[in-house]
Every structure is written in structure tokens, then in C-alpha cells.
Amino acid sequence: MEVLRAFGKEVTRISRALWYKDEEACVLCGREGGPICLTCTTDYLHPELGRCKGCGKLIVATKIHCLDCETGKGPKHLDQVTAWGHYTGELREFIRNIKFGAHPREVMKIARPFSDWAISQLPVVDGVVAVPMHAARLAERGYNQAEVICSALHWELGLPLLPGVERIEPTSSQVMLSRQERFRNLIGAFGVRQPEYLKGRSVWLVDDVTTTGATLEAVAKVLRESGVRSVYGLCLAAGLEKKLVPS
Ligand SMILES: [Zn+2]
Ligand SMILES: [Zn+2]
């Protein structure tokens, strides 16, 4: 009997250890201190810095706008753009795994911290809109990662998912293009099939990563043309071009 009780205790101890280990692992690096450990928070999320209220670039916490936005070179069709972290290191690996590694469910691991952060940065809106993917690309990948992120926001914050915007042109990869070319490449790429879902609303426009902001701008433009009142861009990460760590 004593042996059995000791055995039972041991089982409890091990399962608890396993459970807590699992609970505490950082989603990004796997070390202790999840969901996002202190090192990853410092390296990728930069809580010590502010985000430009226009384009989302990292700036000193005491400033409101970056130099670009102060001089009128900020987003044109968006009220504000913001990104949770920097597209680098473990965060980049995490996003690439969601996108190219066929692991869309991984998004749920960061759903809570990302949603909490988003609601602290942006005004409450009528709903979330995912940057759409062309049907051919969607058929290839099986899911749109931006829609998966929207589902996480919907789940955590109760924000409605707003449909109606689609990608008409299967634009080629933007990676090799200059900033100017990216904007040009996206002309006519998006359209709104059902403006009735969007007219008069305020939305968070969601994508996984933003670099030049060209894609967000192109979608925001058609949203505006469909009568959307306010558009706030929201991404998991911003590319290096946005890394304006104050010098
Ligand atoms: Zn970590
Ligand atoms: Zn700015």
C-alpha cells in the first residue's frame, strides 16, 4: 500500500513537472518563461521602445511620430500601422513555420500575448480583415496565414471577421522589387466583391509581415474606396526596413 502511494506521488510529480515545463516553454526559443521569454521579448518585441503612431516604426518611447511621418511620408490610406515584433531570428522562424511549414495552428500559441498587445496599441474596431491571398496561391498552401491570425484575434478579442476583399491578380513575389516597384506591382491586385460588409466600418487590416507597407496600402486603398471609415494595419512582425531603432 505504501509502495503504491509513493508510486502515485511520483506519477503526480512527473506529470506535473511535464505539464509545467510545457506551460512555461517559450513559444519562440523553447527555453523557460513562456509564452514569450524575457530574452525573446527583449530581442524581438522591444517593449522599451515606442511605435510610431503612423507607420509603426520603432522610435524612442517619448516620441509619437517618426521623422518620415512627421514630414508627410507616412501611410496614405491607413490611419496607423503597427507590428508586434521584428521579423528576425526566432520570431522570423516562427512565422516562416506558420507560413511555409504547414503549421497554421502554431498561431494559437501566441494568440493571447499578440491580441493583448494589439488591443493596447489600436482602437477597438468593428472587425478584422485579412490581407487576401489569390485563389491559386490559396489552393497551393491550403490556408491564408493572415486569415489564421484574424481567427486568433476573433477568438481572443471577439472581433468579427469581415469578408468581402479579394486578391484578383496573382502578383509575383515582391521580394526582389524596390519600394517603388512594389507599389506599382500591386496596382489593381485587390478588389472588394461585397462592399456591403465593409461600408462605414472601422477595421484592423491584418497580415503576417510588413516590409515596405506596400501590400497594406494597396488593400487599404480598395477598402477606403468601398467606404471603410478607418483602417489600422496590424502585423505579427515588421521587416528590417522598419527597424529604425533610434540612434
Ligand atoms: Zn524565448
Ligand atoms: Zn512613422
Image (cartoon, rainbow, N blue to C red):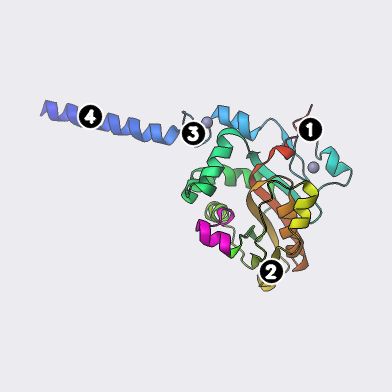
Residue drawn at 28 percent across, 30 percent down: 14
Q: Is residue 139 magenta?
A: yes
Instruction: Find out whether the residues at labels 1 and 2 contact each other: C-beta distance under 8 Å.
Output: no
> Which comes sooner in the sequence, label 4 or label 2?
4
Q: Secondary structure at mark 1?
A: loop
Mark sitting on residue 26:
3
Give whichever of 93, 85 is nearer the camera: 93
Q: Is residue 83 magenta?
A: no
Residue 89 image point, x, y percent = 58, 33
Which amino acid type is marked by label 3? Cys
Q: Secondary structure at mark 2?
A: strand
Give whichever of 87, 46 is nearer the camera: 87
Apparent side of residue 132 relative to residue 93 in the rendered image (left or right): right
Question: Is label 3 within 8 A of ligand 1 (CB to nearest ligand atom)?
Answer: yes
Apparent side of residue 7 relative to residue 145 in the rendered image (left or right): left
Which amino acid type is marked by label 2? Val
Residue 155 image point, x, y percent = 52, 54
